Amino acid sequence: MLESKEILLMCSLLCSSDVIAAVSLISYENEPNLYAIVFGEGITNDAVSIILFNTVLRFTESKDTKIDSMTPFVIAKDFMLLGLESFLIGILFALMSAFILKYYRAFTHNAVSECMLIFCFGYLSYVVSEVAEQSGIISLLTCGIVMAHYTWYNLSP
């Protein structure tokens, strides 16, 4: 028989849905906006399910935790904190990359070094999040989105 903690972990794993079937039915050439919406929903759903699983895993790892009426509130608080910290780590590294490419032009003389710098900042965002026991995927996704808005304009032609 499964314990309550094991049931919570299983439910957090099963809450994500796969949007590959929906995305495969939509043609990007005919409906680019619908494709982007469905694809974005899938990424967001996966990100939320990863954060939820990590939160429930942290909650169930400690031996002295008991499941009671406060459990949903504890999980919700940890969920928000984990998501926010991962989000902030991604923003920090993306803004650092934009700052470095804007003010230190020694990195912008070669397209290969620019690309390598962008990949390194994305990877650093992921690694720092994982070392800090946050969600590396969320941090990397946030870093990529913020880099697309700020770092892109600081690249050489």
Image (cartoon, rainbow, N blue to C red):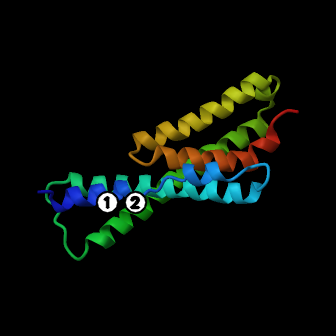
Residue named by callout 2: 15
Residue 134, horizontal then vertical, whole percent: 42, 48
Q: Residue furthest bottom?
A: 69
* Residue 122, quarter of the rendered image: top right
Residue named by callout 1: 11
Q: Quick check: marks 1 and 2 in contact, CB under 8 Å?
A: yes
Q: Residue at x 67, y 50 (%)?
A: 146
Residue 155, horizontal then vertical, whole percent: 81, 36
Q: Is residue 33 above or below residue 91?
A: below
Q: Residue at x 71, y 29 (%)?
A: 115
Residue closer to the observer: 48 or 139: 48
Q: Residue furthest front?
A: 25
Amino acid type shown at disc 2: Cys
Residue 149 is marked as none
Residue closer to the observer: 20 or 59: 20
Quadrant position of the C terminus in the picture:
top right
Q: Residues within 10 Å of mark 1 (few under 14, many from 20)?
A: some
Residue 33, horizontal then vertical, whole percent: 75, 59
Q: Residue at x 79, y 49 (%)?
A: 29
Report, in whole angstroms, how far the alpha carbon at label 1 lies from the one at label 2. 6 Å
Amino acid type shown at disc 1: Cys
